[in-house]
Amino acid sequence: MDLSTTALLTDRYELTMLRGALAGGTAARRAVFEVFARHLPAGRRYGVVAGIGRFLDALEAFRFDGPALDFLTSQGIVDEPTAAWLSSYRFSGNIWGYSEGDLYFPGSPILVVEADFAEAVILETLALSILNHDAAIASAASRMVHAAGGRPIIEMGSRRTHEMAGVASARAAYLAGFTSTSNLEAGRSYGVPTAGTSAHAFTLLHDNERHAFRAQLDALGRDTTLLVDTYDVARAVAVAVDLAGPELGAVRLDSGDLAETAHEVRAQLDSLGASKTRIIVTGDLDEYAIAGLSAAPVDGYGVGTSLVTGSGAPTAALVYKLVARAESDEGPLRPVAKRSVGKPSRGGRKWAVRHIGDDGKAIAEMVATAEPAPGPYDRPLLTELVRDGEIVGREPLAEARARHERALSELPPRAFQLSRGDPAIPTEFRDA
Amino acid sequence: MDLSTTALLTDRYELTMLRGALAGGTAARRAVFEVFARHLPAGRRYGVVAGIGRFLDALEAFRFDGPALDFLTSQGIVDEPTAAWLSSYRFSGNIWGYSEGDLYFPGSPILVVEADFAEAVILETLALSILNHDAAIASAASRMVHAAGGRPIIEMGSRRTHEMAGVASARAAYLAGFTSTSNLEAGRSYGVPTAGTSAHAFTLLHDNERHAFRAQLDALGRDTTLLVDTYDVARAVAVAVDLAGPELGAVRLDSGDLAETAHEVRAQLDSLGASKTRIIVTGDLDEYAIAGLSAAPVDGYGVGTSLVTGSGAPTAALVYKLVARAESDEGPLRPVAKRSVGKPSRGGRKWAVRHIGDDGKAIAEMVATAEPAPGPYDRPLLTELVRDGEIVGREPLAEARARHERALSELPPRAFQLSRGDPAIPTEFRDA
């Protein structure tokens, strides 16, 4: 697959709309599209914005090169004038957005795209794919991090999701507070710390567990993590400490009753003098299982499937909607909205602030169709990402990670209940 | 992101196991790894094999180039001997697998990888990511196609999943019987037919619905699909037929009570003489909603979110396990298996046939640790994909699509119930 351009990561209807608008003379009308969620996944208290940095990278690579245009014209998807327009396409408009790591609530204008209709309409799928995926993963990750109460979590779900989604999942999980990932490409591309030592296959390769442990210790040193549940856990722990001594870094449990086994292994390690050897648990953990292990002597978690599948909410249900457009190439922007059952949309370009009380706690998400005058503690939420086509909103992933922690600290305690409930703060809409 | 190699779409522990095996002298032991599912997603009757072709492409691009090796050594993940070994890595073993589009059941050996331990152990994440994703999507798609009862289904879920997962989802859905996709990259990369005309944004761009419809008809012709639920459906249908005449291709409904509205729109179209104009429905459909619309006058469906999220089962839970290995570089293969609670594995290299009765219907999935003697109607399931490192199992996607239809025709009727139940046929294990 040719991945030198992201231009065909697009739904066909965006290019047929472009074709119709070019032919009909409406393509140059100024327009505003917004990304928002009509609702959070059932029972979730907050959403986590993620994918903004990946979207900016993808936008930069969104160019209709020769092979892409050949495909589109040979299939009759676009006509010659549309192909000519696409061949010189570079987004030249403005984009504002919530910063990565910040939180969102129903109706939060996560991304605001202002450009000619033609330039903006063809970004729908690219923006939504990236933001829907990454926000779903980061939102699930944030709950797991809270449930872990300061204990580190390794992301290890790559094998349970699309191979490139695995890389993005590792990034989103790190942003939301995970400590590291098993995914090497995420280490290289995004600087996420990587982790991992061995699987059961390594033990099974050897004639016995002692041989396997010795080979791993020889290669990786005593600070490594030995997997002790291939045969008999107690025997494996004894062999592990016998070979590595009390400097053994950690043991990993991947099956069985993790809480009970962790207690037994902790007692055994302590009795062998390995009181600093950590216990890492893995195996079908989610935020509920992590919370259930809070009283067990566990030093770290590995989470796979439930992280990369959004723990029951694999997509964030974000939409990309036209909210305003001019009535001519030069006219002022007018709010527009669809009028269909069950899917309310609010017309007009939006601004947003998080309304914060004098105790530093968030009170409401204020969304308005005019630029608001923020109160003394309020925090404006939209930052400039693209100005006249130039990307100005890039930032290191570490900044997003730190922002997420700060944004969480503003939330009231009810935001952190794992049970289903309403959004942690209400969204208040104000018309200009 | 540099995508010229797939080598870092790998979990770190695979390379540390390699490092340990190289240092310990066990790396060249002959080994067999297998991909299988311990169980189907809760209540599903069958799984659909998908992703084999994508895996073969990814295997071909699995090379540790300079930048990849620099990353691995600079991070201390591999030592120099391991880096040297990786730099000349090319898979030189044998791989057999179920063909794409065929079905699988618990314990089916979907992929059998035979090679030196070192060569095979590092393919775990690559194989599982691709097969877990694609099988989950194809398995959900197959149920939707059956529920649609011959009516066409357009895949349109790209926006609700990772941008590259969207492309793979379109491929998997087509393989399982979907008619087309909205995703242009899937059209280019895999030849999946593409579809799509317009969104509500196109209507809202124009001063009124009549202008929008006229612009679309002018650009795309009368055979296009007009979206009629932006304002008032009945009025939109009247305008659509007024402008396009009875040759109007289709109208699309994306909201409201789809069954009731489809009946009203069908009556209106017929009364206007547009009896050949089709009705396409979209909007949060899954296999249950599709089945619920079977009595409605609907001519086609568009499915998004539920398809790309596997309709409740976003991953296929396939695992990659060492099942046999030699005890020395030259010795015979011996079965191996982990002995841990709740996760049974069966040691030994497997063969599989679908046991078919004289009525042409499948009776059981026969999985054995010796090459079986198939009965007169039985169908051997493993085909050669890679021979001594050379890829020999590529095939056109159309073949997989046709195979899926044939494989389904072997299943008993209970396989097609949407309700939860046991696998359609039992898996019978036989030891050599």
Image (cartoon, coloured by chain):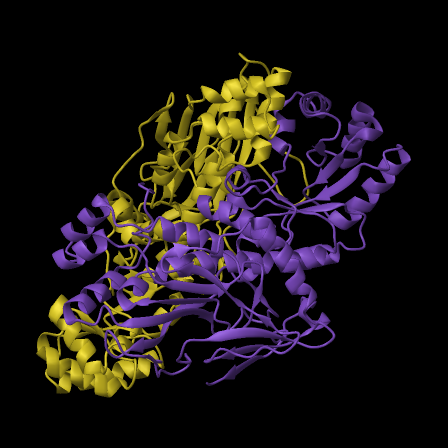
Chain colours: A yellow, B purple
Residue closest to the eye, B56 or A25 = B56
* The image quarter in which residue B163 lies: top left
Q: What residue lies at 56% left-to-right and 49% top-to-bottom? A: B397
- The percent coordinates of residue B81 (x first, y second) are 14, 58
- The percent coordinates of residue A120 (x first, y second) are 49, 27
Residue A101 visible (yes or no): yes
Count of picture labels: 0
Q: What residue lies at 64% left-to-right and 64% top-to-bottom? A: B407
Residue closest to the eye, A300 or B64 = B64
- The percent coordinates of residue B122 (x first, y second) are 30, 61
- The percent coordinates of residue B300 (x first, y second) are 72, 46
Residue at the top extreme, as displayed: A330
Relative to B288, say whether A206 is above or below.
below
The answer to whether residue A106 is left or right of residue B197 is left
The answer to whether residue A267 is left or right of residue B159 is left
Please state, as top left, top right, bottom left or bottom right, where the N terminus of chain B lies in the image. Answer: top left
* The image quarter in which residue A216 lies: bottom left
Relative to B172, say whether A241 is above or below.
below
Residue A116 visible (yes or no): no
Q: What residue lies at 51% left-to-right and 18% top-to-bottom? A: A84
Relative to A299, say whether A234 is above or below.
below
